[in-house]
Image: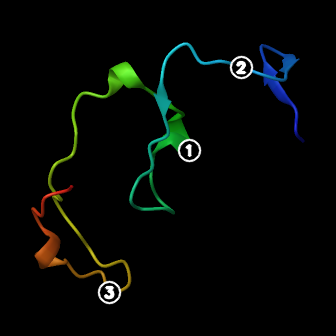
Amino acid sequence: GDTILLNDSAIHAYRFKENYYFVAGDKVMNSQDSRYWGLLPEPFIVGKAVRIWKSVDKDTGKVRWKRIFKKIE
């Protein structure tokens, strides 16, 4: 339904005490991301992605060599 419970009590509003992030994996049907383990607290973030490590075409399964090590902006 549309009821949200916190410790077995219905709540209508909630304010987080710190910033949380929803982290999504690149394999939609087979990723252990925030859908699996929940929201990520900001203090757990220890770095920033700056380059593409690997890129595979989802339709053909072939490596997209032009994207390997490309800078993320």
* SS label for mark 2: loop
How far apart in space, not on screen, are marks 2 and 1 (Cα)? 20 Å
User: What residue does disc 2 label?
Assistant: 14
Label 2 sits on what residue type? Tyr
Residue 18, image x, y percentages = 49, 17
| Looking at the image, residue 26 lies above or below residue 11 | below
Which quarter of the rendered picture does the C terminus lie within? bottom left
User: What residue does disc 3 label?
Assistant: 60
Q: Earlier in the sequence, mark 3 or mark 2?
A: 2
Q: Residue at x 12, y 77 (%)?
A: 66
User: What residue does disc 1 label?
Assistant: 35
| 46 with respect to 58 (left or right) | left
- Total count of labels: 3
How far apart in space, not on screen, are marks 3 and 2 (Cα)? 44 Å
Q: Nearer the viewer, residue 21 or 25?
A: 21
Q: Residue at x 45, y 49 (%)?
A: 24
Q: Residue at x 21, y 46 (%)?
A: 49
Label 1 sits on what residue type? Arg
Q: Quadrant of residue 42?
A: top left
Q: Quadrant of residue 57?
A: bottom left
Residue 58, image x, y percentages = 36, 77
